[in-house]
Image (cartoon, rainbow, N blue to C red):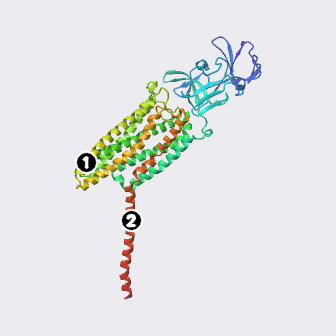
Amino acid sequence: MDYKISSTSNAFNEINRTHMLVNDLSRVVSKDSMCFDKETSGEYIIRICEDLKICEAMRCIHKCCPDGHSFVNGSKCEKTWIHGINLELFSGAVEDFQDNFAIIHGYSPLYPIQHYMKYRINSRGTFFVSDRDGNKTYLASERSYCFEHATKGGRTLGYVLFRFFPNIEDVPLDTKFMVNRWAMAISVVFLLITSLFYIFTKETRKVFGKCLVSLCFSLLILFVMLAAYIPFKKNLLEKRYSHVCKSVGFLITYLSFSCFIWFQVLCFDIYRTFGSSSNQIVVDKKKRNMRRFLYFSLYGWGVPLLLTSLPALFHYKDVLPAPIRVEVAVTKCIIEKRDGNYAEIVFRIIPLTIIQVADIILFVKTIRYCLKVRKDIQKLSENNSKKKRFSVKQERLVLVIKLSVTMGMLFLFELISSFVDFKMNPTTANIEIIWDVINCLQGLFIFIIFVCKKKTFEGCKKRIDIDRLRKISLTSNTRVTSVPASTRRIR
C-alpha cells in the first residue's frame, strides 16, 4: 500500500534496529516491510506491506505479478520496471477507478477473461462476474482475478484482466463430464470386445479386419485419454504442468485425427475392393495384403502426425498473426477457441472437412459401381461364385455406411460447436450434453454394427452345434470300441 508523506526531514523516527515510526501515519512499521521513494511528480511516498485486513478499510485490487514485474511470453513474471495498474483502461468495469487502492499480488493459475464473461469491480473491491456457470461474487480478499501488464514475442499486449481457476478439490466435476466419462468407459469396453472378437475369429487375416481394429485402437486410446484428462484438467493448466498439458492436448488432437483417417482408409479399402477386378491372378495373396496394410498404416498413422505437427510447430514458434495464432494450455489443453481467433477452424475443422468430403466422394463412386455390378450379376444368374464375392463386398459396404453415420455425427458436432456456443441457453446446453453422450458411445455403436450381425450369430450357433456333434461323436466311438473288448474278456 502506498502512502504520501509531506517531507523527508521528519518523516521517520528510528525506534530500534528493526522498526521505525512513520510520523505522518502515526504508526510503527517493520523496516523489512516498507520502502521509501520519490515520484516523478516530486512527491514522496512510503510503501508498506499490509495485512489482508486492510481490504476491509479500503479497496484492494489484485495484481498478478509483484510490482515492477509483468507477464513476459506467457504467465512468467519478469522485471520490466512497469509499476502499478492503470485502471483507467478498465473505467467501464471498475467503479471510481481514480480512487486510491491497495495492491494484492501473487496468485496462479489463471487465464484471460473471455468475451462472454461480464464483470465489474465496485468501490469496495468486490468482484462480480457472470459466466457460463452463472453469476458469482468474490470479496476483495478472495482469489478470483488479477490485472497484469503483458508482452509476448516482443508485442505489447497492455494490461489484461485474468481469471483464476479454483482448486480442483473445491469444484465437483460437472454433470456433463461425469456422464461423458461413464459413456466413454462403456465405449472402451465394447471397443476392446470388438477388437478381440476380430482377432480370435481370425478376421484380422483380411486387410479390412486389420483396418477396423486400428480404428478401434485409435478410438479406445482417445477415450482413455479424454476420461483421464477431464478430472485433472484444472491441475494440468497450472504453470508447472503446462508442458504436460500441451503434450496431452496435442496427443488428443493426434488421436482424433487418426480416428477419422482410419475411417477414410476403410472407405478407400471398400472402394478399391469394388473397383478391382475379381479375375486377377494373385500369386501370393498374403504377401500382397500385408504390403497393402503397410501402406494403409503409413497413411493412417502418418497423416494425423503431420496434421498435428503443424499446429504444434506454429504454437512453439509463435510466428502466425493473432487471428490464427495457436493458443494451447490457457483455458484448456487443446487448441483454444476464442472470439476473433480462427486457429481451431484452420488447423482442425478445415482438415476434418477435407477428409469428410473425400469420404463422401469415395462413397458415391463405390455405391454407383455397386449398383452397376449388381445389374450385371443379375443377368448372369448361373455364376454363383461371382454372386458370393459380390455379396461379401456389399455387406462390407453396408457396414461402413452405418459406421459413417456415427462418425459423421462426431464430425458434425465438431463443425457446429466451432461456430456455435452451445452454452448460450439451457436448451442448447442440454442438446450439447445429449450429443456429447452419443459421440462418447461410438465404441458401443461399432460393436453393434460389426459384431451384432445375423451372420455372426449364425456362425456362433454353427460352431456350438459342431462342438456338440464332436462331443457326441467321441462319446459314441468310445462306447462302440469298448463293447468288443469286454466281450473278449467274458469269453
Could you tell me residue 207's position as x and y percent? 33, 49
Amino acid at circle 1: Lys
Label 2 Cα crowd, 10 Å radius (few <14 / some 14-19 / many 20+):
few
Helix, strand or loop for disc 2: helix
Query: Viewer-proximal residue, 262 or 175?
Result: 175
> Which residue is denoted by mark 1 in the rendering?
375
Q: Quadrant of the C terminus?
A: bottom left
Pick whichever of labels 2 and 1 is earlier in the sequence. 1
Occupied quadrant, residue 52: top right
Could you tell me residue 143's position as x and y percent? 63, 31
Residue 23 visible to the viewer: yes
Horizontally, residue 466 falls left or right of residue 69, namely: left
Occupied quadrant, residue 51: top right
Horizontally, residue 196 falls left or right of residue 108, namely: left
Query: Foreground mark, 2 or 1?
Result: 1
Query: Viewer-proximal residue, 87 or 430?
Result: 430
Could you tell me residue 164's position as x and y percent? 59, 31
Amino acid at circle 2: Asp
Tell me the residue at 36%/41% (across/down): 264
Occupied quadrant, residue 119: top right
> Which residue is denoted by mark 2 in the rendering?
465
Residue 143 visible to the viewer: no
Alpha carbon separation for disc pair 2 and 1: 37 Å
Q: Which label was assigned to residue 72?
A: none
Q: Is residue 347 above or below residue 217?
A: above
